[in-house]
Image (tube, rainbow, N blue to C red):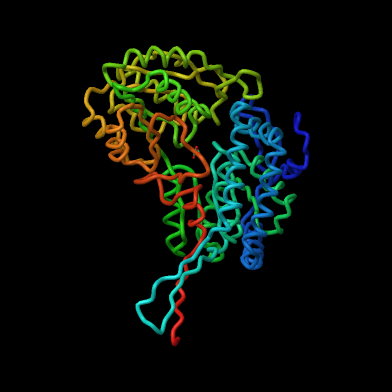
Amino acid sequence: MEQIKNLSLLSSLCENVNSAIAVHNPATGDVLGYVPSHNREAIEKVIEKAETAQKSWAKTTAKLRAEILSRWYQLIMDNQEDLARIMTLEQGKPLAESRGEVAYGASFVQWFAEEGKRAYGETIPTPLTDRRIMTIRQPVGVAAAITPWNFPIAMITRKAVPALAAGCSFIGKPAAQTPLSAYAVAELARQAGLPEGLLAIVTSSDAVMVGELFCSSPKIQKISFTGSTHVGRILMRQSAESVKRVSMELGGNAPFIVFDDADIDAAVKGALASKFRNAGQTCVCANRFYVHDSVYDEFVAKFAAEVSKLSVGNGLDDGITIGPLIDDNAKKKVQTLVNDAVAQGANITAGGDDLGGQFFAPTVLTHVEHNMSIVKEEIFGPIAPVIRFHDDASLIDMANDTEYGLASYFYSKDINRIFAVAEALDYGMVGVNEGIISTEVAPFGGVKQSGIGREGARQGLDEYLNTKYICIGGM
Ligand code: SIN
């Protein structure tokens, strides 16, 4: 593959294309290579190996685990450029964003390598003099994850590393569109000295079979999923039979609110970053903009001017800020939502064009009403619908009027309003005067139908630990 220096990162590419998945470049449609399509039997073997490996890993010290994971962090950063190229080739995001994601993905490795040492239990004051009470934290066992194509490395490391740091083994199934990045980081874990069987990547053209197997296997104790709410519900239902622990990071419909006292230039900057990162294909992207009547015209003029400067194309080319959408279906969905909004009275203030292939122009829609499909649905594309609002009370109702509750954003300089609105927004995450809030040190996750559980931060480690209560009597 072009310009990848460390060819060991591509050791997952296979020659036998009969039982393989073709990986495409969304910018050109070219086939980049093939990865194996594992069948049920092959994945069952991987699960058995993970179960055996986990038993020994759980007996190692957190210090030793941290040493291995720290080496993995260093290798990821040493190979940042190659990993970024692989990511751009299979996912499409601009190279600068891919470099950023490699560093973001690595930050979870570094953070959890350290945090694994702090899986503290407690001693609890006893109510009976002849007893002593304490808790210890133990790894849940084998963890399995299904990860999406929009963050091909960070979504693997955000799940795998807390699992490994806690003493679990981990099996990841990356999206069929972006398996190369996952295999490449797993290869670096091997080079860092992670014992065999503890971190496995499986790929299959039968995603339904893999999900069902992960959820039903008695050897797997934990399922973590990032993807649509629809699929999350299915996985939760399937996991119910064996009462597995689940973490679900599901869909979002983030409101981005600009109040009358906002710093408009800062709001425009935040809106660009929040909406157009990864061509609008993130669960935490601003999905709908509410702008106060008194600053609406200024915001729209400045925002549309900046959006018109974004440069669409192949993410490997210099100066590109918006890559292709992941596939034809993604583009069709975006086009349908734009057509529907325009048919109902929305204006295209910037963009609006189908640029051929899987490219769609970054677009600003004005005269948008709260009840349009483009406001109700998760767009997952570079479209910014802007709604005018008049009073704070109805605004909060509109912002919370969704089954989702992942991220939300607002701009204001008034400290009283900042606390009141942050508390009133029914979301797992709130960005105040910031358009991008993801970091390894803070808990990422949603409420309502956006999911269960948290990733990153100390809460991310809890997802892979059981608390055991020990009572010592007869003292
Ligand atoms: C996501 O879209 O699921 C992840 C985005 C992030 O980590 O910022």
Locate residue 170, reporting x and y percent: 60, 56
Q: Where, quadrant-wise, is the C terminus in this rendering?
A: bottom left
Of residues 119 and 276, the one drawn nearer to the viewer in this rendering:
119
Answer with left or right where residue 290 lies relative to residue 274: left
Locate residue 47, reporting x and y percent: 62, 61
Residue sitting at x 63%, y 30%: 88
| Residue 171 higher or lower than 437, as above or below | below
Locate residue 56, reporting x and y percent: 66, 67
Question: Could you say which quadrant of the image residue 269 lies in?
Answer: top left
Residue sitting at x 59%, y 35%: 101
Of residues 312 and 321, the one drawn nearer to the viewer in this rendering:
321
Tell me if I can see residue 374 in this picture: no
Locate residue 444, reporting x and y percent: 46, 44
Of residues 398 and 261, the one drawn nearer to the viewer in this rendering:
261
| Residue 71 higher or lower than 268, as above or below | below
Tell me if I can see residue 102 in this picture: yes
In this rendering, the count of numbered labels is: 0
Residue sitting at x 48%, y 43%: 227
Q: Where, quadrant-wise, is the N terminus in this rendering?
A: top right
| Residue 366 higher or lower than 255, as above or below | above
* Residue at far bottom of view: 474
Residue sitting at x 59%, y 56%: 165
